[in-house]
Image (spheres, rainbow, N blue to C red):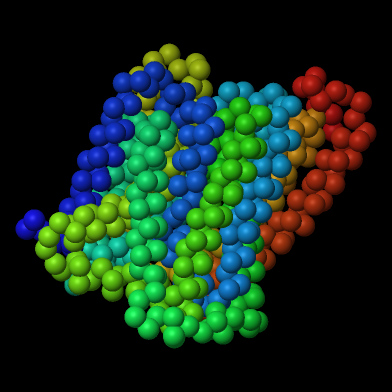
Amino acid sequence: MTLTGYEAAFISIIIATAFFAGVAYLKMNSIRGVFDFFHNPSPKKNAFSLTIANITLGSGVVYLVLGAETNGILMLLAPAAILAGYLFLSKSSKSLESCDLEPGEDLLHAAQRHLDRLNPNDPVPLAKYFSIFLMVVYALGLSYELLASPMVMMPFLTTSPGTFAAISISFFLLLTALLTVVFGGVSGVLRTDIVQMISAIILILIVLAAICPQGGYQETASIDSILIFTTSSFVAVLMVCVAAISTQYYSLINLAVGSHLESNKRARTFRVVGVSVAIITGFFIFASLITQAHGENLLEMTANMFSPIGQSKGFFPVILGFSIAFGLSSIICSTADSTIIAITQFWYFNVSRGDSGREPDQQRSLKNIRLWMAASSIVGFGLLSILYSFRQDLFTLLLFIASGVPAFAPAIWLLFKLVSKPHTICVFTRTVLWTYLSLIVLAYFVAVALLLTDNSKSIGLVGIVALAISIVITFFVWKKARKIDLNSNISNNSGAVQC
């Protein structure tokens, strides 16, 4: 072996691009039309895919690990909050089991269909504007993930990281995710997720090896270092938990996966995903707490463990370097490809109002979808280059991206209730729609103002306040819907509407 561990790690990123694109390409000929491109009805495959898509690197694992170092043992509440969010989502999804959802229909599309029926000439454009806002937020989130993750990977790739190397890695990660989706659609995503999950498990084993006691490791242990119970830590963990719960409702990926499944399997799939993600994220937080109790940093310890190996030549350094880089790439790409397919699905069905069952030329439609996907991803990479100027304060950038979107969570919860009883959908008027959207826009304006006035530490509170106001708005709208439901003499199954 003439390669060093670092060289093998860098090459593995290029190999990952070719491998995942090739696996997805093998599914290309089996895609018969637009519906097949966006949907796969397998509960097991979707649960598997959604689990690995939730294990993000820059905005997930690293965020939680650093949070554990700052807030100590309280961060173990975060996995519990993720589980709670999915259990709430599962319960909300269960209310749709008796509804007349069409095959492959997402929640926003179902709500729009009922609003179209209520006022065919001038319906409330709920699905269009909700989808546009969520698409923009998730495109920014994808750009952030591709921006932050290479910085996590660099210590495992070289001893002298630079801007060009980080941008190159970002490009290959985006290219990998894009080719996976363009060739294979959602089936390509599901197939590559199997390999990505295996790679993630190998990475977990490497982290375990890094935190195993060595030398005087046990003697330096101090449980007091992780027992952090300050006001700031309580507030920080509360914000993390609120975000973990609310995210599950407005997540484009969750809503997209929900559209793939039959009604009676949707709720169970969300429960399985919630348990799986909670266990995996809990592991990384627990590993961080163990190293912190021994006066170490998990990320630095893992990187330091690899550094002498990475500079060495031989079979073991090459295999280890390849495994780490391939595993990190897999975690990033699993989130990126799921995000790209979800954004494209919502653009096609809810913004452009495409109808996969009535497309006269399915292959031409697929070509246009793939071209739109590629073009939007290139724009996304341009966003990445702009966002790179904020690389010194990635945490603030993440808080900014998430500052207004929590306000969507109560609105989505409300839609679950309204769609399950379509005769109440009339409460979602234009006034209600623009109230929600105005609140979200206002939240982002406040976040920008805080950013420009060097009050970035307060940006995290913007999302909490926006969520609280949205809950109040939702309460009054739902109260009106309940009144309509109680006074209605029309069967829910008739499809009629009474306000």
Above-or-below relation of 145 to 291 = above
Which residue is drawn at the image coordinates 22% and 63% (left, top)? Answer: 157
Left or right for 419, reference 44: right
In the rendered structure, the answer to whether residue 97 lies left or right of residue 271 reads right
Q: Residue 23's x, y, as percent?
A: 29, 33
> Which residue is pictured at 53% across the width and 44% down the height?
252
Q: Foreground: 244 or 46?
A: 46
Give percent across and percent down for residue 373: 36, 38
Check the image and name the residue furthest to the top: 360
The structure residue drawn at horizontal position 37% and vertical position 22%, both measured from the top left corner, is: 31
- Relative to 421, residue 361 above or below: above
Q: Residue at x 56, y 45 (%)?
A: 273
Judge by depth and name the residue closer to the eye, 487 or 240: 240
Vertically, is 436 above or below 151?
above
The x, y position of residue 406, in whole percent, is: 61, 57
Whether residue 402 sits left or right of residue 148 in the image: it is: right
Find residue 361 and report its image quarter.
Answer: top left
Q: Based on the displayed image, in which of its 4 quarters is residue 28 positioned?
A: top left
Q: Is residue 340 visible?
A: no
Res. 38 in view: yes
